[in-house]
Structures are given as C-alpha cells and as structure tokens.
Amino acid sequence: MIIILFGPPGAGKGTQAQRIEKERGLVQLSTGDMLRAAVGAGTDMGKRAKEKMDAGQLVSDDIVIGIISDRIREDDCRNGFILDGFPRTVAQAEALDVMLKEQGLKLDHVVEMRVDDKVLADRIAGRYSCAKCNEGYHDTAKKPKAEGVCDVCGGTEFTRRKDDNRETVAKRLEAYYADTAPVLPYYEKSGILSVVDGMAAISEVAAQIDAVLAA
C-alpha cells in the first residue's frame, strides 16, 4: 500500500505516519531524510544532489524523484510506504505518478488532514517540552500534573521551540496553502483523495484514517 499524508505543519502527520508504519508494516519516507542518506551514501543521485547543494542551488524535481525511486526499491519498502512532505507541487505529483507506473506501482490513498487554522495556531503556540526527557506538554491541553514538574522524569526545566509561535505558524500556513494545497485537486480528480478531521483527538483521527485505508 502506498499512501500520501497531506496537512499543514502541526496537523499531526508525523504522529499518524508513525502509527501506520508500526501497525501496517509500511515505511515512512521523508524526502529530507532520503536526500541526506543518498548524499551520505554517495549514490549517483546523491552525487547529483550534492553538486546542486554545494552550488547553492535547489535540488531539481528529477533528482528528488530519482532518489525516491532508488529508495522504494529497497527491501523494507516491499509492503509499501508513506510519503510525508512530498509532492509539494502538481509537477512533482505528475512526475511521481510516472515514476511509480514505471515500477509497476500506483498510489492507493491520499489523505488530507484538514485543520482549523486558528485552533492549529493555538495548538502549536502552546507546545512545550521537558528539557530533560523531551516529554511534550501544552499550555491548556496537557499540563503537568504537578505545576512545573515533569510527569515522566520529575524534571523542572522546560523548553519551547523558537518557531512555535503565532507569527511563524502563520507564515508556515501561508506557504502551505500557496504551494502545497493546490496539489490536492490533482488527486481529487484521480479519485484517491480522502479528507479526515485533523482537529479531532489523535485516536479519532487514527480511526478515520484506518477507515479510509480499509475502503
């Protein structure tokens, strides 16, 4: 089974991808991770990517597609995989379809985790974590049982990501809707796009996605 998860930053794609990976034996593929691995391994595509990066240029779509093509031929992808963060444009979506067809494969499901922008901003801006064990908390949704003390390790120091603020979230949402969201109609025309409520509880989102995958 081949799946793409769509949704803006903070929608919970990573959480759901990890769950699907564990429960269904699929592999979560991040283009950033694949790119770094290909460069580190010195593959043909990795060398081409490194040349672009060393020259301060963006890695072209054909190189990214080539890296994905190489990666999904590996044994751990034989049961399928989940793409996270790709494709970002219609051109990439079209190139991905061509590459998969060449390998005798096709996309099974594209899942959009739809969110409310304001609620999402509240969710992200309120996040913080224990500096010692990295347990996650939230200003309103998940506070430590004892104020100022981590439930897991008893630590008393907490940190927030610098980009977990409303201004940064607004910019990331703007970029998502401008660049990535236009890909969704492409998959809607193909009849493989499904929408789930990304603002629901994690277990409910999981149940919605599982229903899509079982269809």
Image (cartoon, rainbow, N blue to C red):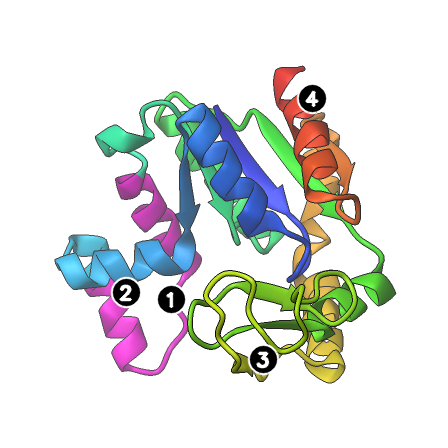
Residue 173 is left or right of residue 44, and the answer is: right
- Crowding at label 3, few (<14), some or many (≥20) Cα neighbours within 10 Å? some
Q: Earlier in the sequence, mark 1 or mark 4?
A: 1
Circle 2 residue: 49
Helix, strand, or loop for circle 3? loop
Of residues 186 and 34, the one drawn nearer to the viewer in this rendering: 34
How far apart marks 3 and 4 lie (CA) works out to 35 Å
Tell me where residue 130 appears, x and y as whole percent.
51, 72
Point 64% across, 62% down: residue: 9
Q: Residue lying furthest top in this view?
A: 215
Disc with the residue nearer the chain's start (2 vs 4)? 2
Residue 41 in sight here = yes
- For disc 2, the neighbor class at 10 Å (few under 14, some 14 to 19, many from 20) is many
Residue farthest to the left? 42
Which element is circle 1 on?
loop
Q: Is residue 190 visible?
A: no
Measure the C-alpha gap from mark 1 to mark 4. 36 Å
Q: What kind of residue is marked 4?
A: Ala
